[in-house]
Image (cartoon, helix red, strand yellow):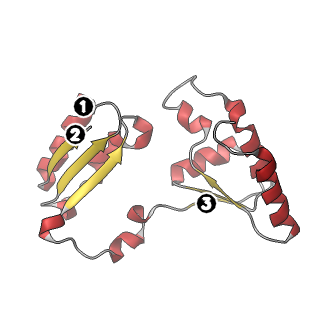
Amino acid sequence: HHGFGNPATLWSMVRYAKQTSRKVAFFNFETPNFMEDYFPNQFDYSLWNLWIEVVKKVDLVISNSHTSQLYGRQFYKGSEHIPFDHWLTAINSEAYDWVPDCTERKRQLLVLTRAEPKKGLNIVHQILSEALRGFHLVICIGNGTIPKQGEDQIKAACQKFGLTYEVRV
């Protein structure tokens, strides 16, 4: 069922957690309403029916980004009583500040993505800054190519902030 596992097993875990007074958190990644904004009319919302019912029984919904949190809150109807929050990956949080400076030999920024707007390729130029001066940007694209406008934006940002870059497919 769309890679969502065995519904009976999922419900057993939720039931066991509730019976033993444990809290249940649901990790939200991408909901159909989020994906529809990028790829209209390509998703069968019924594939998420199991998740919609599960979310009504959890104690917290944690999303992988603020954007996913907003879409998740809109999508999971009947869960208004449940807190929604987001937990950013380390590179997007204060944890980044704990990483020691790179040596000159390893000053690379690696971006692994696919050529889909929802995967962030269209905003790579926005993450570049003066702090990355002297770095080499490597963009590894799992499928597709960078649209000309996007490549022009990346090239301009690299020039502005003193990065070299390459694209690998």
- Residue at 21% of width from left, 71% of height from top? 102
Give residue 50's mark.
Answer: none
Q: Residue 167: where, in percent of width, then height?
A: 21, 41
Q: Residue 138: where, in percent of width, then height?
A: 22, 49
Between 104 and 4, which is closer to the camera in this rendering? 4
Q: Is residue 42 left or right of residue 15?
A: left
Q: SS class of the residue under badge 3?
A: strand
Callout 2 touching callout 1 (CB < 8 Å): yes
Q: Determine the CA span between mark 1 and mark 3.
A: 34 Å
Q: SS class of the residue under badge 2?
A: helix
The kind of residue on which mark 2 rests is: Gln
- Residue at 52% of width from left, 32% of height from top? 37
Residue at the spot of label 1: 149
Q: Residue 73: where, in percent of width, then height?
A: 66, 48
Q: Determine the CA span between mark 2 and mark 1.
A: 6 Å
The quadrant in which residue 19 appears is bottom right
Residue at the spot of label 2: 153
The kind of residue on which mark 3 rests is: Asp
